[in-house]
Every structure is written in structure tokens, then in C-alpha cells.
Image (spheres, rainbow, N blue to C red):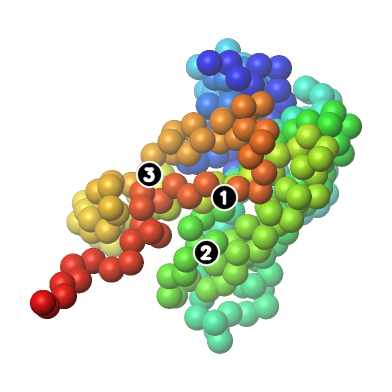
Amino acid sequence: MRRLEGKIAIVTGAGRGIGEAIARRFASEGARVVIAELDQEQGPKTAEAIAADTGSETLFVRTDISDAASVSAMHKAALEAFGPVDILVNNAGIAVFRPPLETTDDDWDRCMNVDLKGAWTCTKTVLPDMVGKQNGAVINIISNHAFSIIKGTFPYPVAKHGLLGLTRSLALEYADQGIAVNAISPGYTDTQIAEDDFRATGNAAKARAKVEAMQPVGRLCRPDEIAAVAAMLASEEARFMIGENIVMDGGVTIRMYDDIRTAD
């Protein structure tokens, strides 16, 4: 399918993992894609590989979403190369885990500035393009931390709850202007970050097996599965979907308890 033919898309954090998969899928659907990535070594490689594999135009722009000037420069480069933006995927994020009373102001600000404020900065930068066209799609990649908490992960879930609120608020504000704002909340996803975490334990195979055993489907989510849903949300097929949060965690958050037995 070429559902995004002629569309201009920005995907933040698209150098690897979920962002790369989304950028690749968008390009395969006909979009011209801006790889808005902080890593200036990985970003160009990803952009070149996607262009070579799909035949679609890509543009790497080194972008720090926590810096409004950097986001503005990225948007300017996108306009000059491709034109007004049709699709934004706010994928870039960081995990900041600290005990609450040991969380410094710097910890808090670093988490919020990337995971919440960064998404808003990117969104408000491209919204005028979409308003001008009376058409557009914003997709926020959140997490099941947006509604289900794991102890020991503060303040990350606070930012993710905020991002879900941002999604819903903006969705209503712009629904009557042809702009669909939605979210995807992945669970444990098989990315390089996950593999690095497994290796850090000293026994990657054992660590992976432990995590996979916790998933109702018995495996981790694949980035391309998230990309498939993102492509649907970005397309004209999903314009009646407003402010939704599609959970892709293999059933983790609908499970209450395991191995509960009740006596007759």
C-alpha cells in the first residue's frame, strides 16, 4: 500500500528502534520523511538506508527536542526540503528512574523536558502547517507507563501520564480542523536498548527469557508492529479516530493476577 503518498512526515528519535521502524514504514507507504534524531552518527545512516531501501526521499536533521531552537531549525529544514508538514510522530524520549526523594530538580527537568515538553514543542511548531492545510496527523508514542505504574520508575510515568493528557487535550482542540491527534502505548519492545539492558545483567539470554515469560503472548513487541499501527493512524483511513491511545503491550495491562487459585 501507498497510503501516505505525497505526505511529509517528521519522526523524532528515528535513528533506531521504534522511530526507525516508523520512519521506514512511512517511507514504504510513499511519504517523504524527516529523521529528526539527536545522534549525528546514526541519524544519517538510517536516513540513507531507508531512502535506498524504499526509494522515498529522506532528510536527516540533528534535533534536540528539549531545545526549542533546535526544533525550529529542524522544521525550517523540513520546509525547505519538502514543504509543510502533514504528519508528526513524537517518538523521542528518555527513561529517568530515580527514588522520589532522591530525584533532583535536574532529574525532573531532564525527564519532563524531553518526554513531555519536547513533544509539545515539536507539536506546536508543526501545527500551523496542518492548520493551514486543514488536515494532519500527530502521533505520540507514549508507553503503558501512561496508565499503569511499575514501582521504581519515578518520574518517568509522570511525564507519560502528562503526554497522554496532552494527546487528548490537543485532539479535541483541533478535531474540527481536520487534524487527528492520537497515541500508541507500547509495552516491552525488542529494541537495541532492551538488548543492551539484557546484556548488562551478565546473562542476556536468561534476562530476555525472564522478561518474555512475563508477557501474555510469550514474546516482546516488534518495532515493525508499532510502525504498522502508526501508518494507519497517519493515513486518511483514521481521520475519525480522535484522542485515542492504542495499547500494544501484549495484554500485560489487562492481566490482574497470575496463578490465583480459589478453594471451593
Sequence-wise, the earlier of marks 2 and 1 is 2
Please report the residue visible at 47 percent of the width from the left and 66 percent of the height from the top.
Answer: 148
Sequence-wise, the earlier of marks 2 and 3 is 2
Please report the residue visible at 16 percent of the width from the left and 75 percent of the height from the top.
Answer: 262
Q: Residues within 10 Å of mark 3 (few under 14, many from 20)?
A: many
Residue kind at label 1, given as amino acid type? Asn
Label 3 close to label 1 by CB (< 8 Å) = no
| C-alpha gap between disc 3 and disc 1 | 17 Å
Q: Nearer the viewer, residue 232 or 46?
A: 232
Q: How many marks?
A: 3
Q: Position of residue 120 (x, y in %)?
A: 75, 53
Residue kind at label 2, given as amino acid type? Phe
Select label 2 or label 3 by which is in front. Answer: 2
Q: Position of residue 263 (x, y in %)?
A: 12, 78
Residue identified by numbered label 1: 245
Label 2 close to label 1 by CB (< 8 Å) = yes
Work out whether 197 lies above or below 58: below
| C-alpha gap between disc 2 and disc 1 | 10 Å
Can you name the residue that lies furthest to the left here? Answer: 264
Residue identified by numbered label 2: 147
